[in-house]
Image: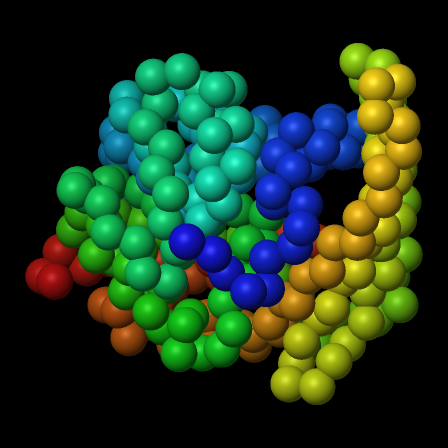
Amino acid sequence: MSRKSLGEIYAHAEIYEAVYRARRKDYRAESDEARSLIREFGNDARSLLDVACGNGPHLRYFREDFAHVEGVDVSADMVRLARHNLPGVPVHQGDMADFRLERTFDAITCMFSSVGYLHDTGELNSAAESFVRHLNPGGVVVLEPWYFPDTFVPGQIMSTLATEGGRTISRISHATREEGDIARVVAHYLVADPASGVEHFIDSHDLKLFTRREYETAFERAGCTVHYRERGAKVGMFAATLGRGR
């Protein structure tokens, strides 16, 4: 199972994990924010599914707050590492646009702008249906979107240097805007360790710039009431609640 717009980094799960450790990404704060929206707009949720869970950093904190948690991700290597990081937590391989599990949940999350990997509104609608298909009546989807067309700023450069366990990783990325409201992020990685020397690979991501209204329409079509929570300079968060009559 694959998604064409995924970057090379998703086949290097440990490198991905090391880079975001070096960046000190605050997964706990992000998980707390999602949990707060779940409590505000949903039921007294006891079960949660994290879609596009990656190597499981948000699930690590969600399992402290919910009696049952699971994850799903399209990358086989990310699923492997998530299972290693979170023994006993079911983590499935599946595409957010059309995954099918054997149970439903009180809450579903999709963090870190992973929804940007969907190619168009057709796939966004399919993803919303997939989420809602796994949601209990009265449940809530919390979605962290990618940039909107009017908030993305091309030309961004980011750099990260991570050193741990004898290995050094350097990542430098540059973002451009392409036709069709696509943000292209191209990252160059240098990975050096004593055994294998220095490896270089290029990691390219094409991320769709959906409008706020396109997100809202997708989940309204799927039977949800949608709220958008501003977050200052950061991208906001959607909370989509499923009506009990569905």
Q: Residue at x 21, y 56 (%)?
A: 133
Report which quarter residue 242 is drawn in.
bottom left
Vertical placement of residue 216 versus 136, above or below: below
In this view, which residue lies farthest toward the front? Answer: 196
Vertical placement of residue 60 versus 7, above or below: above
Vertical placement of residue 119 versus 8, above or below: below
Q: Residue at x 74, y 80 (%)?
A: 178
- How many numbered discs sit on the rendered protein? 0
86 or 137: which is nearer to us? Answer: 86
* Image spot of residue 99 (x, y percent): 30, 54
Report which quarter residue 154 is drawn in.
bottom right
Q: Does the rendering let one see residue 159? A: yes
Report which quarter residue 123 is drawn in.
bottom left
Q: Does the rendering let one see residue 25? A: no
* Image spot of residue 42 (x, y percent): 30, 45
Q: Is residue 129 left or right of residue 74?
A: left
Q: Is residue 112 left or right of residue 129?
A: right
* Image spot of residue 155 (x, y percent): 89, 68
Q: Residue at x 22, y 45 (%)?
A: 101
Quarter holding the C terminus is bottom left
Colouring method of the image: rainbow
Q: Residue at x 83, y 25 (%)?
A: 196
Q: Is residue 52 left or right of residue 196?
A: left
* Image spot of residue 225 (x, y percent): 31, 64
125 or 178: which is nearer to us? Answer: 178
In this view, which residue lies farthest toward the bottom? Answer: 179
Vertical placement of residue 50 versus 2, above or below: above
169 or 139: which is nearer to us? Answer: 169
